[in-house]
Image (spheres, helix red, strand yellow):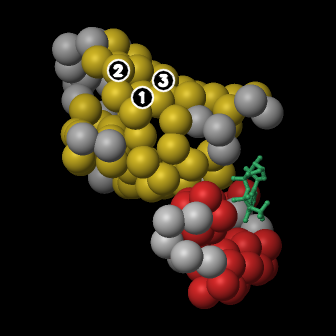
Amino acid sequence: MKTLTVSVVTPDGPVLEESYDMVSVRAESGELGILPGHIPLVAPLTISAVRLKKEGNTDLVAVSGGFLEVRPDKVTILAQAAERPSEVDTERAEEAKQRAEERLNQTKSEDIDFKRARLALDRAINRLDVAK
Ligand code: ATP
């Protein structure tokens, strides 16, 4: 069976490069499932978990937005930050979640700080979900 080479890259360096049977991502346009041979595509990603399937197992990577590039035999994810479950510091994410929640309570929804806090909360929740 054909496979896809998946690489996840951040400004700090590569997070993962492995072969998988299928990749599922949450793009801004919705869920995408990518199998080998997919048509070329570029799409912005949401703050979400990337699901990588191989021989019945699923690996997860928390990505903080970024871009997906699909070629028939390769998927590249460029993200500002990306962590595998074992790399998530849950205490740090819990603290970030709490800080963001406090900021959301103190600011108005039209403020730039509210939007930043909302994104920080999404990143923290995503990290905690992946680490679970
Ligand atoms: P914090 O407020 O805790 O810094 P953040 O969401 O603002 O969280 P980012 O700007 O998304 O952090 O990430 C900065 C760097 O820190 C990235 O390299 C990212 O992988 C890492 N990082 C952030 N939070 C965690 C975490 N909970 N566990 C492991 N690495 C983390």
Q: Amino acid at mark 2?
A: Val
Dots 3 and 2: beta carbons under 8 Å? Answer: no
Tell me, yes or no, if residue 57 can be seen here.
yes
Give the residue pinned by disc 2. Answer: 42
Q: Amino acid at mark 1?
A: Leu
Q: Looking at the image, is 17 positioned above or below residue 90?
A: above
Of the pair 48 and 103, the residue shown nearer to us: 103
Where does the image place residue 71, in percent across and percent down from the top left? Answer: 33, 13
Mark closest to the chain's N terminus, 3 or 2: 2
- Which residue sits at x=29%, y=37%? 22
Where does the image place residue 17, in percent across and percent down from the top left? Answer: 58, 28
Q: Amino acid at mark 3?
A: Thr
Dots 1 and 2: beta carbons under 8 Å? Answer: yes
Give the residue pinned by disc 1. Answer: 68
Dots 3 and 1: beta carbons under 8 Å? Answer: yes
Give the residue pinned by disc 3. Answer: 76
Count every numbered label the image shows and give the total. 3
Where does the image place residue 42, in percent across and percent down from the top left? Answer: 35, 20
- Helix, strand or loop at label 2? It is strand
Of the pair 105 and 22, the residue shown nearer to us: 105
Mark closest to the chain's N terminus, 3 or 1: 1
Answer left or right for 6 relative to 79.
left
Q: CA distance from mark 3 to mark 1?
A: 6 Å
Of the pair 33 and 123, the residue shown nearer to us: 123
- Picture quarter containing residue 114? bottom right
Where does the image place residue 30, in percent across and percent down from the top left? Answer: 23, 46
- Which residue sits at x=49%, y=72%? 109
